[in-house]
Image (cartoon, rainbow, N blue to C red):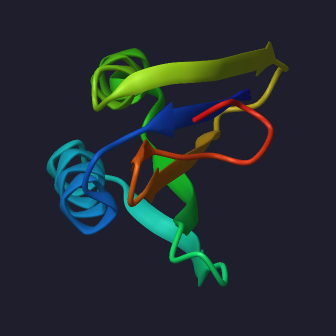
Amino acid sequence: MRTASLTVEVDDVPEALGEARTAVEDAGGYVGDETTTRDEEGHERTRLVLRVPVERYADVLAGLEGAGKLVERRAKARTSPTRSSTWRAGSSPSGPAWPGCGS
């Protein structure tokens, strides 16, 4: 199994989420979990767990990394036929935002 965690800064969270969903579904995958929050300053943050077929994993991951400013990327490999990716996006009124990333 391969897993990856990406933190990506974007200007428009809803638009980036739509693009991520489309990319995953076009690859034959699906969104396994989604959580969106907004803090008291209006900063929106979303966490997605994406399930992607093994043969499309690298392509989808590369596309997600290109969705905005890549802040953090972690990847692991294990022996299993399933692959998943956790993708996080955030924005703020003063530009992209993600906790602890100066974003």
Vertical arrangement, residue 26 with respect to residue 92, above or below: above
| Residue 2: x %, y % from top left | 69, 25
| Residue 27: x %, y % from top left | 23, 42
Residue at position x 38%, y 60% from top?
A: 93
Vertical arrangement, residue 83 with respect to residue 79, above or below: below
Residue at position x 61%, y 80% from top?
A: 37
Which residue is nearer to you in this view: 49 or 35? 35
User: Which quadrant would the N terminus be assigned to in this image?
Assistant: top right
| Residue 20: x %, y % from top left | 29, 50
> Left or right: where does residue 6 sit relative to residue 29?
right
Which residue is nearer to you in this view: 96 or 89? 96
| Residue 28: x %, y % from top left | 26, 51
Vertical arrangement, residue 92 with respect to residue 54, above or below: below
> Left or right: where does residue 56 sit relative to residue 3?
left
* Image quarter of residue 71: top right
Vertical arrangement, residue 89 with respect to residue 71, above or below: below
User: Which quadrant would the C terminus be assigned to in this image?
Assistant: top right
Residue at position x 51%, y 53% from top?
A: 50
How many numbered marks does the figure carry?
0
Which residue is nearer to you in this view: 14 or 99? 99
Which residue is nearer to you in this view: 44 or 16? 44
* Image quarter of residue 84: top right
Residue at position x 64%, y 40% from top?
A: 82
> Left or right: where does residue 102 sit relative to residue 92?
right
